[in-house]
Image: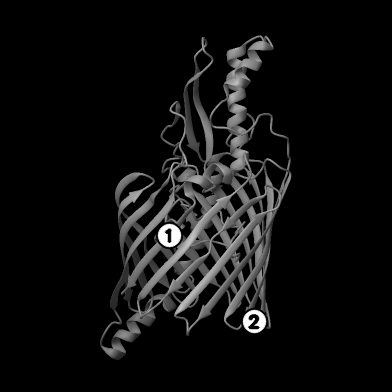
Amino acid sequence: MSRRQVWNKGWLVVILISVGTTASPQGLFESSQQGYHENEIVSNYFTLGGFIRSAGYVGSLPDNSGYYFQSAYGQAGLLMDAHAGQVATARADIRFRAGSEFQERFTEWMIREAYVDLSSETAGIRMGKMINPWGKGTIYNPTDKITPLDPTRRSPDEDDMLLGYWGVEGNVNLGSFLRISATWKPVYQASVLLIDPVPMPGYVEFTDPWDPGVTLAEGSYGFHVSLHHPVADAGIYWFEGYHHWPGIALDTFILNPGTLEPESLRLMEQPYRIRMAGLDFSMPLGTWIIRAEGAWQQSVEDRTGREFVPFPELAYTAELERSLGAFDLIAGYYGKHILEFEEASAPPSLSPDREYFMQLIQQQVEDPLESIESLVRNQVAAFNRLYNYQLEATYHTAYLVVRGRFLNDLLEASLPVVYNVTTEEWILQPQVSINPADGIEITAGFSGLYGPEGSLYDLVGPVLNAGYLSMKVTF
């Protein structure tokens, strides 16, 4: 399908969004006017809140020569909510942060969210920078291909990893049980690759990422049908557009022909378009909650010659949640099945190995330099598969989350444990929070990624693993 055809399909989103604002014009606007005449005032108000946080992360240096402050910063956040009459609301979440992170000093500010929402009982439309993840899973969400995230962000609040994107969302309520939403995301917003803080050899350089631009034909869109019933909640999803995780593409590679040592390897983050269809459901059974979610994903582009484009896949997760007094337990399974699977033709690497180059020379291939560039491209392709967990035909992951509240909720503790059976990788993230008074939160914990040699967590774990302490005041 051409990108022009994708844009033509994208008009369906615009139509649904338009329906969201015109389906009931009297319901949208007469209620606010009616309130004005009856009360002689308009129900307009503005609230301002926020937080101030100080956090410190202690980890080991990449060369294991000692411990250092992996991250130390002060942060302020402002949350603004505005209401205009009965149909209009607006929200802005602005963050300021300054300190040191991964051995570099920084000062940053960001508008995390800023949107206007017009809604009635029957329809609504929201436009602006927003965060609206899909899926019901606690840890894994196979259906969420819209919301970008930054897993390298050092924060004790997991939601801080989510990044806002600019978009338009319209919805129509077809009764009390059925809701149809459409999302249009015309501006691409990439997630931050987990390898960004990882040290690379001097000859490896990431160039400016390829950007689809802001032409309407490059937009992404999705549909969400939400079913609500006392027995169960369910959702059906469709997405077509750019996956928020970009791939890594080979730009140029220069080899010294005399020494066979790499002189320059230029890589580039490259987004790719996909189609995704998914569903989920959640069902309470007494003190139990059952959740399940699954999605099919396939790239729009041909993979031939594109080392950054992944294989099609099926991903699925199932959870059981149980409340036991002061404790909540969540046990889950996450799996992936790679469609059209093929074995990787080279080991995954972003640092080409001279040993492989020597083997090609000794084999007396017809054009060794061209063969070496092909080998490097295959290594980059294999690394993309390592990152996307597509080196094996199937993957199986089990996880357990234990949460407890004690002393009348003054003390909260959680312990998520994730184990990938296929790759033998672990995630351990114990955390304890103390709330000595209203608006005060002191949090301590540890974030750890572990894996065998050659795994993704073996690469990024030594850089990202850290213990932390955070103090936060909310107002």
At label 1, the amino acid type is Tyr
Neighbours of disc 1 within 10 Å: few (<14), some (14-19), many (20+): many
* Badge number at residue 468: 1
* Badge number at residue 159: none
Which residue is disc 2 drawn over?
230
At label 2, the amino acid type is Pro
Q: State the residue at coordinates (59%, 78%).
A: 327
In space, the residues marked 1 and 2 are separated at their CA atoms by 41 Å
- In the rendered image, is residue 300 in sight? no
The percent position of residue 213, horizontal first and vertical second, equals 42, 40
Instruction: From the viewer's side, name the closer residue of 347 and 208.
Output: 347
Q: Quadrant of residue 110?
A: bottom left
Q: Give the side of residue 222 with respect to residue 334, left or right.
A: left
Q: Are marks 1 and 2 in contact (CB under 8 Å)?
A: no
Q: State the residue at coordinates (52%, 79%).
A: 405
The percent position of residue 435, horizontal first and vertical second, equals 40, 77
**In which quadrant of the rendered image does the C terminus lie?**
bottom left
Q: Is residue 351 above or below residue 283?
A: above
Colour pattern: one colour
Where disc 1 sits, the SS reads strand
Instruction: From the viewer's side, name the closer residue of 391 and 59.
Output: 59
Where disc 2 sits, the SS reads loop
**In which quadrant of the rendered image does the N terminus lie?**
top right
Single out the residue that lies furthest toward the bottom.
38
Single out the residue that lies furthest toward the left.
40
Q: State the residue at coordinates (53%, 33%).
A: 249
